[in-house]
Amino acid sequence: PAAAARKPARAAVAKAARRAALVVMMSPPEEVECDVVIVGGGPAGCTCALYTSRANLKTVMLDKNPAAGALAITSHIANYPGVEDTQMSGAALLERMRDQAIEYGTVARRAQVFLVEADGDSKTVYTPDLTVKAKALVLATGAMGRPPSFKGEDVYLGRGVSYCATCDGAFYQDREVAVVGVNAEAVEEAQFLTKFASTVHWVTAVDPKPDDAHAQTLLAEPNVKHWSQTRMTTIEGDDSGVTGALLHPKKGDGEPISLPVEGVFIYVAGSKPITDFLDGQAVELNPDGGVKVDEEMATNVPGVYAIGDIRNTPYKQVVVAASDGCIAAMSIDRFLKGRKTIKVDWIHK
């Protein structure tokens, strides 16, 4: 038993040694110190940066690719308050958010974070070219960590492929769409799409449970066609976007079926929070993989906060992510300045 107990300890030591060696090997040429470092430049990260910068906290925001996040790949935004132009893309809205944060003093850098050290009063974030030391660390990397499950999924993402019916459903008025997946999220999103689509093709590799009341309600909808025990293998399309989906039913003659749809909503494995860079840290995760936070967006590690889809909240909306960023920023301001109350960020005239 003693030898068995020593094995995990030796493994932990070896892992720590490899991490330390990696940091030394990379030898980042630049080191920056700030009050707040935000990992992730989506709507949650940008909003947090805006508020912390306005609170005179030196803020550095790191984003591996401004064009790769959930908002950036959204073709149209129609449900963000104050955005009247229904032709505005997610990328355009995100650019406005980023520019506004920068205008108030945020330092935005494009960098891939591969390691963080969250313990202690000083938090350290490592990238290949930059090391950032801060008093507060904000995790805002989102939840797009699931690799594509189907051929064409990555090609047509944002051009007919979506993971959010609430976000994009209204764009498919009187059009045919496919919903892939049998979990609760798939059922709920398919139900939402029945308000808009002429036909919702529900594709499930296994049958829904007979006692699943929500699934049975969905199946009772007149514009829902259920493809039971059927796999989708390929998403078809052209320069205009998605034009169809290739299905393989388990029953019948086994011949593939080309389904003429303009939208494919995928809920096979759910979205996976991007937390790989937290490996070895004490930051607590929920059973679903999302970072666990309290009502102030604080994690179990003092000075570390998590906002947006990395929490794996079911409400994956831009306005919710922005709200998270605001809450975290105001909490950080109180935390760093030792106040007991929140300082409201508005100006009376």
Image: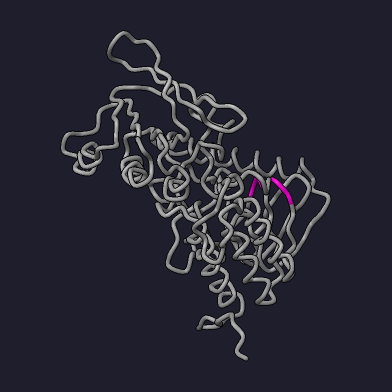
Query: Which quarter of the figure is the C terminus placed in?
Result: bottom right
Residue range in magenta is: 110-115
Report x, y in % for residue 101.
Answer: 68, 66
In the rendered image, the residue lying farthest to the right is: 29
Q: Is residue 283 magenta?
A: no
Residue found at the far top of this picture: 253
Residue drawn at 59 percent across, 58 percent down: 85
Residue 226 vs 271, above or below: the answer is above
Q: Position of residue 147 (x, y in %)?
A: 53, 33
Q: Is residue 117 visible?
A: yes
Query: In the rendered image, is residue 2 in sight?
Result: no
Residue at image coords 63%, 51%:
116
Q: Residue 232 is drawn in which quadrant?
A: top left
Q: Which quadrant is home to the N terminus?
A: top left
- Principal secondary structure, stretch drawn in magenta: loop
Is 68 on the left or on the right of 290, as rendered? right
Residue 304 in the image, given as x and y percentages of width and height? 55, 62
Q: Is residue 322 above or below residue 255?
A: below
The residue that appears at 64% across and 55% down in the rendered structure is 41
Q: Nearer the viewer, residue 203 or 109?
A: 203
Looking at the image, is 264 positioned above or below residue 309?
Answer: above
Q: Quadrant of residue 202?
A: top left
Q: Is 338 or 238 nearer to us in this picture? A: 238
